Amino acid sequence: MSEVFKREEALTFEYVPEKFVHREGQLREISDSVRPIFTGRRPFNCLCIGPTSTGKTGGVKFLFKRIAEEEVGEVKTAYVNCFFHPSPPSISLSASL
């Protein structure tokens, strides 16, 4: 354990918090955009924008983790960091792995 940080894993790209506080409204909006997929319809596109370190990536990962845990039908989630996979072919390949 670090002397500076209680939980160093919280600083990794893979980390997803157990609770996501003070972002209920934003999580609801993202949820609303993907909700149609649970009834066999196409989900809406969702663009999450805002200042650095305000919870955009964490919110999406948190919601996708909850969806994956529910195991609803054939729904599968994928997170692709476009910084590391900037071209459409690499995004498609990363999402399919």
Image: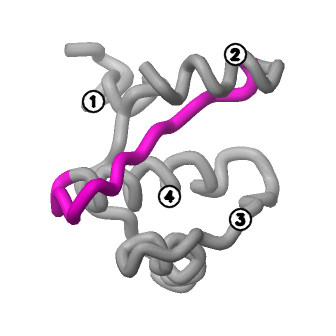
Q: Secondary structure at mark 1?
A: loop
Look at the image and say whether residue 28 sits in the magenta stretch.
no
Do labels 1 and 3 touch, CB within 8 Å? no
Quick check: 92 above or below 25?
above
Q: Position of residue 74 (x, y in %)?
A: 28, 55
* Disc 2 versus disc 1: nearer the observer: 2
- Mark 1, residue position: 7
Please name the residue shown 49% across and 79% down the image: 36
Q: Is residue 5 left or right of residue 88?
A: left
- Give the residues drawn in magenta, as a range: 69-85
Along the polypeptide, which appears first: circle 4 or circle 3? 3
Q: CA distance from mark 1 to mark 3?
A: 33 Å
Amino acid type of the residue tagged 4 in the rendering: Gly
Quick check: 60 above or below 29?
above
Q: Position of residue 75 (x, y in %)?
A: 33, 56
Q: CA distance from mark 3 to mark 2?
A: 19 Å
Please name the residue shown 82% across and 19% down the image: 87
